[in-house]
Image (cartoon, rainbow, N blue to C red):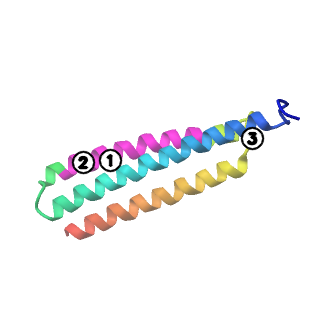
Amino acid sequence: MAGVEAPGDASMSTALELLTEFTGLQGARSAAYAQLERGFALFLGGDAEQKDYVTLANSARDSFVLISQQIQAVELGLLSDDVHRPDLAAFVRKVQELERDKLTKTIELQVASVH
């Protein structure tokens, strides 16, 4: 019936809001990666000093930490009694793990490129 909420609709709306927030945070993480890559390319090309790249890398690291903390909050929201979507929380956790691995490999590759 129109105007009548089925049981669970409020939770689904909340889950949708949390996933929308997650998507936005992933976009911010992507932008931080792009900034890090641009800075590294400038450094390798001689258009930026090492200290400038280090400053940029530290800023990117701080962004990654903040984004990760915000995504952890999304994961906890998905696990809450109100939403109770452990399947979606597991998906978010897996993405977090993959992003951590990607960042580690990106840093390793950049360090290896310099030496």
- Residue 16 magenta: no
Q: Which span of residues is magenta-colored?
A: 53-74
Q: Is residue 2 above or below residue 106?
A: above
Q: Quadrant of the C terminus?
A: bottom left
Residue beneath the point at 55% across and 40% down: 21
How far apart, in angstroms, are the residues tagged by discs 2 and 3?
39 Å
Q: Residue furthest front?
A: 2
x, y (%) of residue 94?
A: 59, 57
- Marks 2 & 3, CB-CB < 8 Å contact: no
Label 2: state its secondary structure: helix
Q: Which residue was labeled with disc 3?
A: 84
- Marks 1 & 2, CB-CB < 8 Å contact: yes
- Residue 62 magenta: yes
Q: Which residue was labeled with disc 1?
A: 60
x, y (%) of residue 22?
A: 55, 45
Label 1: state its secondary structure: helix
Q: Which residue was labeled with disc 2?
A: 56
Q: Amino acid at mark 2?
A: Leu
Q: Of callouts 3 and 1, which one flags the residue occurring earlier in the amino acid sequence?
A: 1
- Between 4 and 75, the residue placed more toward the observer is 4
Determine whether, in the image, residue 108 is placed left or right of residue 83: left
How far apart, in angstroms, are the residues tagged by discs 3 and 1?
33 Å
Q: Badge 1, how many Cα within 10 Å: few under 14, some, many 20+?
A: some
Q: Amino acid at mark 1?
A: Ala
Determine whether, in the image, residue 95 is placed left or right of residue 81: left
How far apart, in angstroms, are the residues tagged by discs 1 and 2?
6 Å
x, y (%) of residue 51?
A: 15, 49
Residue beneath the point at 70% across and 37% down: 13
Q: Of callouts 2 and 3, which one flags the residue occurring earlier in the amino acid sequence?
A: 2
